[in-house]
Image: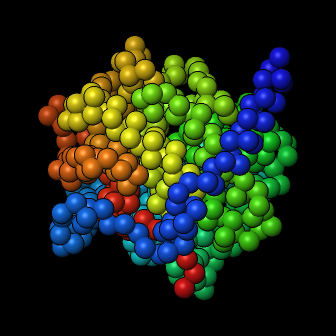
Amino acid sequence: MKIVVQSLTLMFLLVLSASCGSGKQAATGIGAAATGKYNNKLKEVGYSQKDIDAKLAKTYYDLFEGPNKIYFEVGDSLGYLSDIKNHDARTEGLSYGMMIAVQLDKKEIFDRVWRWSKKNLQHQQGPRKGYFGWSYSTDKMKLNSPGSASDGELYYITSLLFASNRWGNDTGIDYYKEARFILDEMWKKDGTGRIYNLINTEYKQITFVPEGDAYNWTDPSYHVPAFYEAWALYAKDGHEDFYRQCADSSRAFLHLACKAPTALNYDYTEFNGDAHATPWMPPAFRYDSWRVPMNIAMDYTWYGKDAQWQEDYAKRFQNFLRSKGIKTYVDQYNLDGTTPEFILPAGDVKKLRHSIGLVATAATASLVNKDPNSVDFIHELWNAKLEPYDDGYFDPYYDGLMYMFSLMHLSGNYKLLTPK
């Protein structure tokens, strides 16, 4: 029975993915990847370019240089980003830091973080060769886990390809060679040691973990169709058609994962969007899921191949949050909009709150939602402050990175970086 259900799911996804290139933007060819014109939504809603530039600069300073920074340099050539509350450096945050650096032309930061990642996290031999250990203890200064989290590799590869396009490959690091090393080793994975491709090659969807049974389910927030389109353009490894199919498969998957009237999705799902329960928490919309609206907004802005559905998604998502109070909605929900019985802690703190990270990514949906009132979410982001809450809780890492990414998207500073 399970095999039959999987086969039916795969057939449905194939049909659905074939329809994901029929959006309005795709038909008219006005995606920013084609035109090179990225919306400065912050300016459109009334903020001055001077103030926008100042807010971006202040946020970058807060994350990389200020008293509550999450970036730390090691010696003359290394650096890492730390999830302060969890006392570790994660491929998630490290690769996010590299993406911020390449988008904002911060080459030294990019190079330091890449060198640190390669030295401390990347496997150079064995079944995991090319992959990265996802977590490194900043207290003990040693690897917590040799296993990979597939989104880290996704961002490493994409940021390296963008670095190759922006800075070339003859300034000390051959970025293209490093990206290809990860990709080439990925394609050699055949299950030896229970290690697999980052992408489930049957479903053409990114895996939660490319290891063991976790190869057969996914995390909706890892689905970034725009990145696969970039791989198809710049990886040049002979898998261009496969990457484009992955982009369409991710778009089709998101239809299923976000089909609830609230537009909410589970943190972890099967490849058909249904909930995947784990030993550490029951299914719900939680921290990982905050990234989904931002990823959809990126795909809409860059490519627009699924514009009609994405516009409906953004409207449903923001309408749900507004129904909970635009200044008071919280950061974890059941998909029907009720409060989950189990609250996932953030570090040592177990409490629902109006988190700036979700405020930020919810605002990016305003790049997609055509309702004029959608600008309210942008103003909420603009007025939000990356600072401790009244109870003392403060997360400059995840909240801060979501805040930074969202400001970049909304100011037109998160782009498909093309070769110079």
Which quadrant of the rendered structure holds the C terminus? bottom right
Taking depth in this image into account, of 170 and 295 the one nearest to the observer is: 295
> Which residue shows up at 52% across the image and 61% down it?
25
Taking depth in this image into account, of 135 and 374 the one nearest to the observer is: 374
Residue 206 picture location, percent across and down: 66, 45
Q: Is residue 412 above or below residue 90?
A: below
Which quadrant of the rendered structure holds the N terminus? top right
Which residue reaches farthest left? Answer: 390
> Which residue shows up at 46% across the image and 60% down it?
301
Display coloring:
rainbow
Q: Quadrant of residue 154?
A: bottom right
* Residue 318 in sight in this render: yes
Q: Is residue 321 above or below residue 48?
A: above
Residue 357 picture location, percent across and down: 33, 43
> Which residue shows up at 85% across the image and 43% down it?
192
Residue 6 picture location, percent across and down: 78, 28
**Is residue 215 found left or right of 364 in the rendered image?**
right
Q: Quadrant of residue 50?
A: bottom left
Image mark count: 0
Q: Is residue 50 above or below residue 255?
A: below
* Residue 130 in sight in this render: no
**Is residue 29 found left or right of 242 in the rendered image?**
left
Residue 48 picture location, percent across and down: 17, 69
**Is residue 335 found left or right of 168 in the rendered image?**
left
**Is residue 201 found left or right of 278 in the rendered image?**
right
Which residue reaches farthest top? Answer: 341
